Structure formats: C-alpha cells, structure tokens
Amino acid sequence: MNQIKILPFCVFLLLSCNNTDIYNDYVDVPRDVWTKNSALTFEVDASSVQSDLPHNVFVNVRNTADYRFQNLWLFISITAPDKSVTNDTIDFYLADNRGKWLGSGVGALRQMQVLFLQNFKFSQKGTYRFDIEHGMRENEITGISSVGLQISD
C-alpha cells in the first residue's frame, strides 16, 4: 500500500527532472488584437549557454475561437549579440481543413507549438533578440492571445 502512495511522487520527480528548457516565455497580445508590424520581442541571455550544444527553438501560439483563419504567417527576426540579423518565416497551422483547432486546450483558448529551429547553436555569448511579427494580409488580426518562445536542449 505504501508503494502505491510513493509511485505518483516518483513519477513527478522524474518528469520534473526531464525539463531541459533554457528559456520559456510568453508575450501577451493586448486585447487579443495583433497589429501588423507590431513585433513581440524575446531577449535570450546566452552568456551561460554552452555554444557547442545544439538547441531546439519552438514558437508557441495561444489563440481563441475568435481567430478566423486556419493558419498564421509569422515573420521572425533573430539579432545576435554582434548585431547580425537572420530573418525567417513560418506558416503556422492552427486548424485543420475542416476548421477543427489543432494543439491543446480547453474551452475557447487553444495552444499550439511548432519547431522553428532544430539544432540551433548560440555561437556568441551575450543577448539574442527574437522579434516575431504576424505576416497576415490584414493589418489587424483578432484572436491571438499570446505568443511564446521556448528553447530546450
């Protein structure tokens, strides 16, 4: 009987030890209305990150049922500590062809994650800045609650 009580505690410890995130943060979109050319900024201090180890960079999106599109185009700009800039684009699918929301969530709020960069190396010590803008045709899009950046080993 005591073993049954200890089992959930052991599982909790194992799961918490596997957390390899070196960065995980969200930026809220004011009033769930995201204006074009309004960048959401994430600053990652890579001073203590091992530069020879590869990392995975994920972009996370939280949306409501008010979002009226199947996908979300994102423009991502990475500024390295030496001020060099790399630009990329993601076509982020939030719903399937029938309109069923992808990802996880309960009720009106959904969360979806996509792998943006695999085996990314922080080759320079210092602060990396990730700026994310939406690339949709409309000037304002409604229903995006927050956008996150997650970096893991």
Image (cartoon, rainbow, N blue to C red):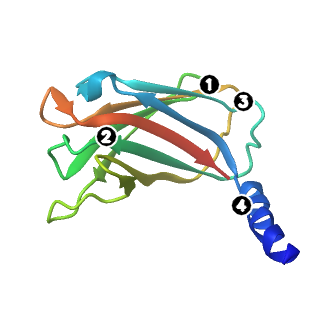
Q: In the visual, does 123 lie left or right of 38?
A: right
In this figure, which residue is indicated by the disc labeled 2?
74
N-terminal of the pair, mark 2 or mark 3, is 2
In this figure, which residue is indicated by the disc labeled 4?
15
N-terminal of the pair, mark 2 or mark 4, is 4
For image coordinates 84% across by 78% down, the residue present is 1
In this figure, which residue is indicated by the disc labeled 1?
81
N-terminal of the pair, mark 1 or mark 2, is 2
Mark 4 crowd level (few <14, some 14–19, many ≥20, 10 Å Cα): few
**Distance between the Cα atoms at labels 4 and 1?**
33 Å
Name the secondary structure under disc 4.
helix
Label 1 vs label 2, nearer the camera: 2
**Distance between the Cα atoms at labels 3 and 4?**
30 Å
For image coordinates 74% across by 60% down, the residue present is 12
Q: Position of residue 44 (x, y in %)?
A: 61, 30
For image coordinates 25% across by 45% down, the residue present is 72
Q: Amino acid at mark 1?
A: Pro
Looking at the rendering, which quadrant does residue 15 occupy?
A: bottom right
